[in-house]
Structures are given as C-alpha cells and as structure tokens.
Image (tube, grey):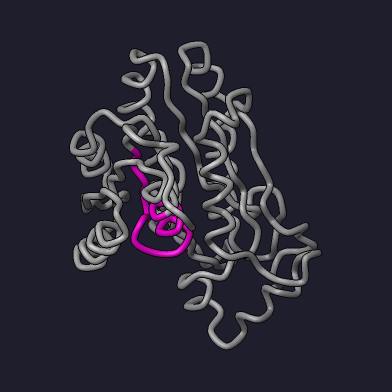
Amino acid sequence: MSASTALQGRTALVTGATSGIGKAIAQNLAVQGADVVLHGRDQARGEALVKQIAAEGGSARFVAADLTDAEDTLRLAAEAGAVDILVNSAGLYEFAPTAVTDAASFDRQVAVNARAPFLLVGALAPGMAERGQGSIVIVGSSAARMPAPIGAAYGASKAGAEILTRYWATEFGPSGVRVNTVSPGPVHTEGTKAMLGEHTAMLDKTTARGRAGDPSEIAEIVSFLVSPASSYVNGAVLFADGGELSALPS
C-alpha cells in the first residue's frame, strides 16, 4: 500500500493493535498519515510495532493496558489523550458450552468486548463532540447474529457492542461524531490459528467466497468508515463476512 495523507493530522487509538485485525487496522491508519496510539498487553510486541510503523514512515506510540480492569481502561483513555478516531478492536473469546462457562469467563468476555468500548467511548467521545468531529468503529463479530452450539457468552458480548453502536450514533451523531460497527465473519489470524490448530482450513468452508478473510480486508473497511467517504454512514453494522454460510460446529 502506498503512503497517503488522507488522515494527516488526526490521532487514532486502536485497541488490540498488536496482533490480528487490530494490527492490520493500526498499520493501515498509519500509512494514511494518522498518528496512531497502539494498545495491547504485550510491551515487547507493542514496541516492535511502533518501530515497524516508524520504519515505514508512520507515527505511532504504544500504551499497555488490561481491558478486563475498568480503572486500567480509563487510564488508557487518559494516556491516549484527545483522539479523532477510536477503533475498538480488542476482543476476547473463550468458546465453550454454557454449562462449562463460569462467571469469571463470562465477566472477562463482557469486560473486554462490551464494557471496555463503553468506558472508552464515555471518556473520549465527549471531546470529539466538543471539537465537532470524530469517528468511532467497533470491530464486532458474526457471532452476534449467527448462533452456534458454543460461545454464547462471546456472542452475547458482541451483540451488546452492536446495540451500543446504535445508541452512541444517536447520542453523539448530532455533534459530528459517527459510530459504526464492522462485523467480520471468519478471518485467518493468530487467534483463530491458536484456537483451531490444524483445523484452521475449516474456516474456508464457511463462506460463499470459499475462503476466510484476511485482516487487511477488514482494515480497509475500517479505513472507509473513519474517512470522509463514509460521512453519511452512522449507526450501521457493516457485515464483512464473505457471505458467511454457517458458524463452525462444536
């Protein structure tokens, strides 16, 4: 991808930016000229990505935070400062049947997938509204609309984030802040490889495209949603699933 100045002068906070979809989003925004605040839990991976973006002519800094902790999430917002773009990409999934999903697992998934975006929007969107512009994107999941025999807690947490998108679009839209969700289907990432192992190829059988997506494809959609090209898109849930046919079996 060639360098661009489409987002020059804008600051973006991307959660979950050190791997998978979040990393692709952060790199994409940096290429377009945004100053990117990278969030993750691993300091070494964060610093490596900062160096990589700098080597490619971009600007980034890293802030570590644990999104299962409410106070640490608010600290992340404070250290990020005034941002023009917020991409809530961090996600936690612990796929298991309901009967063996304990309260702690449920709480962790809701904390990262729904509560963290709620706290970050509450801390950062008012500043965007005061400045009269801003864009917020939630990276959702097709699990919010395609039930499976496992992963109910994850699906519920992602469905919660989708409805928050509509509320925030209504709350902040009149002040120039747009809020949208991109809902990926199966995507080949480090996380899916770790979860499925040698069965990763199963993902390619679940879409009408005959393949799972690449993180860069989701990043391009996020780029569209934060750009002026999508100025009339607000409160939308954009499906980016390759024409998903079914969820993975248990």
Q: Is residue 59 left or right of residue 218?
A: left
- Report x, y in % for residue 144: 64, 48
180 is higher (above) or lower (below) than 88: above
199 is higher (above) or lower (below) than 82: below
Quarter of the image holding residue 128? top left
| Residue positioned 70% across, 48% down in the render | 145
59 is higher (above) or lower (below) than 193: above
The residue range painted magenta reads 12-27
Instruction: Give the farthest residue toward the bottom.
Output: 198
Q: Is residue 64 left or right of residue 163?
A: left
Say if residue 84 shows up in the picture. Answer: yes
Front one among 151 and 241: 241
Say if residue 164 shows up in the picture. Answer: no
Number of numbered discs visible in the structure rendering: 0
The C terminus is located in which quarter?
bottom right
Front one among 106 and 154: 154
| Residue positioned 40% across, 59% down in the render | 23
- Report x, y in % for residue 236: 64, 32
| Residue positioned 25% across, 57% down in the render | 54
- Report x, y in % for residue 154: 54, 55
- Report x, y in % for residue 86: 39, 37
Front one among 51 and 242: 51
Judge whether residue 103 is colored magenta.
no
| Residue positioned 23% across, 38% down in the render | 80
